[in-house]
């Protein structure tokens, strides 16, 4: 099991369980199909670390619903580390793999997938990274949790759950692939959790 | 990691981190748009007191691919005495506001002096000092070995690398012995007795005077070192009597190439003396990765510049911080 990562004295509340996450991803998959009238030309790009397993799960959901979709062939990973605007203010980040499906991004509909949408700066970096890789017809954004506090004019097209938070709180997404279990936790650093 | 002065300074995990980062950098270099915005606004100064084409161009390319500004500072021909000159130059660099100084110097230890004398605040990367160290060359060699013989992952545990040639004057050999050993590989040095340094028996590697014996052990890779023809004359030190004798005893030719195991690769840090330490057959064979070493050099130097310059200088931790930061983002 993953270790207890709570700040000393903090509280922790689980706001989404494994079943909630599963339902949210099923709904998002249907919304992607509805919005794009099928899965033709759709490419799912997960942002490491936790966006990547989410993108894989979404792709599997798309393949289960839509005939003729190959989940592996439409999923990729997009590392945005080298495009971030806060590199100089943080410890050196490890660069993860960028892996775009072989057909490329030109003329396709890219759905960016990430776990938490907060300031929007990761997504800004992702948009820059995409423009260096090709010219998609459209870019859409799917997130498991939108916790507010945007610092840039960016919004998500598909949201698993809107989670009003205080900026001092912490949202942790746990996924079976990376953390051993599914769950979304809110941690209040001062004991002011929900 | 504040500076990169010696391959010896790298721990096993740090070395693997550099190689992993280099692999991601290499992946970006096969794209149509090779330039990344990562080091925008940072200044890298190439300070070369000694001639070098490929290393300087490699560092310049690496810095430019990461959007850093590059200033080339060639101090060749300076008649000022070494210590004084280096200090004055360093003070000039500080005035220019360099974030990183890539230095090559004919004196062993000059990069260390530059990094620790308190003249400048920037990161210092050793691009070759005297007969001491050339850490980025060792890193690119390790990267090339890992890519061909270890599927591009992990370390080099269990590999056997034979390094042949002028070990005495070679900073490439010293750096490679340090780094490849750190990464778990076994290194054997092969050279005439005159071209081995005093104290080589204390190095963490095997030593042999006979190339054919060393090749009979079935190394996974053979790294040929450059031999300077000047060294055979009496003015050059008279380290070996003739080029023909050297190439007969220590050159990699078609016969020795055939004696290598099928998977073994042939490496050379360049520039090559064709016909002296390596024959054209060996240099151009399909097991030769000499040209690839050059392109890997750009990726490795991008990784080193990224790891030294991208993060906050006050924050030393790597990788672990990633998940923490992402949870907050």
Image (tube, coloured by chain):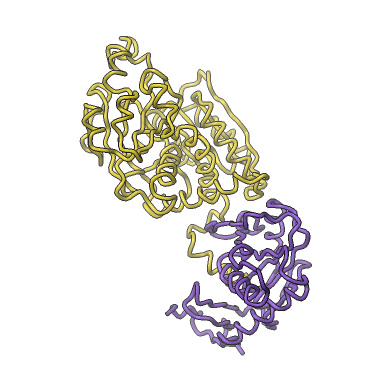
Chain colours: A purple, B yellow
Q: Position of residue A176 (x, y in %)?
A: 50, 77
Is A46 displayed left or right of A108 in the figure? left
Residue at the spot 34% in from the left edge and 13% down from the top edge: B236
Q: Is residue A40 above or below residue B40?
A: below
Residue B38 in the image: state x and y as whole percent: 63, 50
In the image, A120: left or right of A16?
A: right
| Residue A69 drawn above or below residue B82 | below
Query: Residue A33, percent across and down?
Result: 73, 74
Q: Which is nearer the eye, A10 or B221? A: B221
Of B116 and B126, the residue lying toward us: B126
Q: Residue at x 56, y 48 (%)?
A: B27
Quadrant in the picture for the C terminus of chain A? bottom right
User: Most extreme residue toward the front, as rendered?
Assistant: A68
Image quarter (top left, top right, bottom left or bottom right) of the N terminus of chain A? bottom left
Name the outermost residue toward the top: B234
Q: Please tell me which residue lies in front, A192 or B210.
A: B210
Residue B200 appears in the figure: no
**Image height of B134 relative to A119, above or below:** above
Viewer-proximal residue among A9 and B256 = B256
Residue B3 position within the rendered picture, expressed as x and y whole percent measured from the top left: 47, 45
Residue A25 shows in the view: yes
Picture quadrant where residue B169 is located: top left
| Residue B272 drawn above or below residue A166 | above
Tell me where residue B100 sits by quadrant.
top right
Q: Quadrant of residue B229?
A: top left
Residue at 31% across / 49% down in the picture? B184
Q: Residue, x 78% and y 73% (percent of image)? A: A35
């Amino acid at each position: 099991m993953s270790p207890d990562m709570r700040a000393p004295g903090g509280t922790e509340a689980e706001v989404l369980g494994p079943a909630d996450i599963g339902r949210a991803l099923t709904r998002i998959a249907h919304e992607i199909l509805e919005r794009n009238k099928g899965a033709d030309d759709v490419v799912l790009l997960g942002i490491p670390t936790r966006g990547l397993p989410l993108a894989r799960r979404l792709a599997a959901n798309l393949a289960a619903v839509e005939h003729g979709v190959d989940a592996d062939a439409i999923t990729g990973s997009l590392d945005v580390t080298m495009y971030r605007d806060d590199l100089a203010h943080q410890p050196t980040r490890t660069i993860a793999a960028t892996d775009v499906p072989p057909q490329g991004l030109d003329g396709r509909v890219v759905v960016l997938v990430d776990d938490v949408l907060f300031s929007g700066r990761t997504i800004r970096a992702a948009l820059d990274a995409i423009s260096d890789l090709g010219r998609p017809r459209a870019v859409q954004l799917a997130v498991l949790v939108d916790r507010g506090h945007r610092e840039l004019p960016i919004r998500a097209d598909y949201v698993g759950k809107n989670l009003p938070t205080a900026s001092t709180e912490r949202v942790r997404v746990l996924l079976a692939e990376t953390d051993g279990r599914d769950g979304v936790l809110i941690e209040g650093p001062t004991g002011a959790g929900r | 990691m504040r500076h990169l002065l010696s391959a010896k300074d790298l721990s096993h995990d740090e070395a693997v981190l550099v190689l992993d980062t280099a692999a991601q950098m290499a992946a970006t270099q096969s794209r149509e748009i090779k330039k990344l915005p990562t080091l925008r606004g940072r200044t890298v100064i190439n300070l070369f007191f000694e001639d070098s084409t490929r290393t300087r161009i490699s560092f310049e390319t690496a810095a430019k691919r990461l959007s850093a500004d590059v200033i080339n500072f060639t101090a060749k021909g300076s008649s000022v005495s070494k210590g004084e000159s280096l200090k004055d130059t360093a003070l000039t660099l500080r005035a220019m506001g360099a974030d990183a100084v890539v230095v090559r110097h004919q004196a062993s230890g000059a990069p260390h002096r530059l990094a620790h004398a308190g003249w400048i605040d920037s990161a210092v990367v050793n691009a070759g000092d005297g007969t001491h160290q050339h850490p980025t060359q060792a890193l690119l060699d390790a990267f090339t070995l890992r890519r061909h013989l270890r599927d591009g992952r992990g370390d080099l545990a269990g590999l056997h690398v034979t390094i042949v040639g002028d070990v005495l004057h070679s900073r490439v050999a010293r750096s490679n012995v340090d780094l490849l050993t750190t990464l778990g590989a076994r290194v054997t040095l092969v050279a005439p007795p005159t071209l081995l340094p005093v104290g080589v028996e204390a190095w963490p590697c095997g030593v042999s005077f006979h190339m054919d014996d060393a090749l009979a052990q079935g190394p996974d890779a053979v790294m040929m070192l450059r031999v300077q023809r000047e060294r055979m004359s009496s003015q050059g030190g008279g380290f070996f009597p003739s080029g023909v004798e050297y190439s007969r005893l220590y050159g990699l030719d078609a016969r020795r190439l055939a004696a290598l195991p099928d998977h073994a690769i042939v490496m050379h840090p360049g520039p090559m003396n064709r016909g002296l330490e390596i024959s054209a057959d060996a240099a151009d064979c399909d097991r030769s990765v000499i040209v690839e070493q050059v392109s890997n050099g750009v990726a490795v130097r991008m990784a080193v510049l990224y790891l030294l310059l991208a993060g906050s200088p006050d924050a030393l931790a790597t990788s672990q911080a990633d998940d923490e930061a992402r949870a907050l983002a």
